[in-house]
Amino acid sequence: MGYTQLLTAVDFIAGHSLEIVIAGAPGHKNTQTMIRAVQEKFLPNKVVLFHNDDQDGKRLEALSPFVQVMGPLNQEPAAYVCKQYACRFPVTEVNRLNSLLH
């Protein structure tokens, strides 16, 4: 198993990562659906952050200041998918999120 993890780490370093920020209330149904959609896909080079408006969200903003501008859209949870530090337009629908995850 160690060799497999090593190859995954080498792939992560050599390839490009996919940064995904899910912004919304933790108890919102669509937030949970988006998180589940990201977890169900095998994307070994993904980095996922969950950004909400509570104290944990403030700590995340201190560690990763770029998430400060990433929040829900029109009171709906939003997903921000970024590659090589360039983000696509945020999406609020799970089917649109799935189309961005490749």
Image: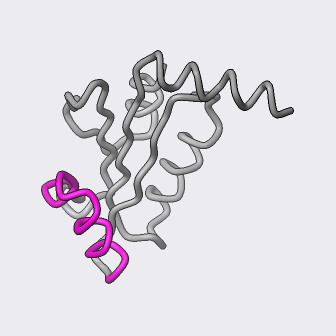
- Name the dominant secondary structure of the magenta segment: helix
Query: How is the structure coloured here?
Result: one colour
- Give the residue at x 32% y 58%: 23
Query: Is 18 drawn above or below residue 93 in the view shown?
Result: above
Residue 89: image quadrant is top left
- Give the residue at x 37% y 37%: 19
Query: Is 91 drawn above or below residue 29 in the view shown?
Result: above
Instruction: Please state the horizontal and vertical placement of residue 96, each as a whole percent of the image.
Output: 38, 30
Instruction: Please state the horizontal and vertical placement of residue 61, each as a whole percent of the image.
Output: 24, 65
Query: Is 84 drawn above or below residue 20 in the view shown?
Result: above
Residue sitting at the far bottom: 55
Q: Is residue 22 left or right of residue 41?
A: left
As for residue 63 lying within the magenta part, the answer is yes
As for residue 65 lying within the magenta part, the answer is yes
- Give the residue at x 41% y 34%: 97
Instruction: Please state the horizontal and vertical placement of residue 25, each as a whole percent of the image.
Output: 37, 70
What quarter of the picture does the N terminus occupy?
Answer: top right
Looking at the rendering, the stretch of residues picked out in magenta corresponds to 55-70
Viewer-nearest residue: 101 or 46: 46
Query: Is 83 drawn above or below residue 70 in the view shown?
Result: above
Looking at the image, how many numbered discs can be counted on the residues?
A: 0
Residue 83: image quadrant is top left
Viewer-nearest residue: 60 or 34: 60
Viewer-nearest residue: 68 or 38: 68
Instruction: Please state the horizontal and vertical placement of residue 2, each as a whole percent of the image.
Output: 81, 33
Residue 26: image quadrant is bottom left
- Give the residue at x 26% y 75%: 58
Residue sitting at the far left: 69
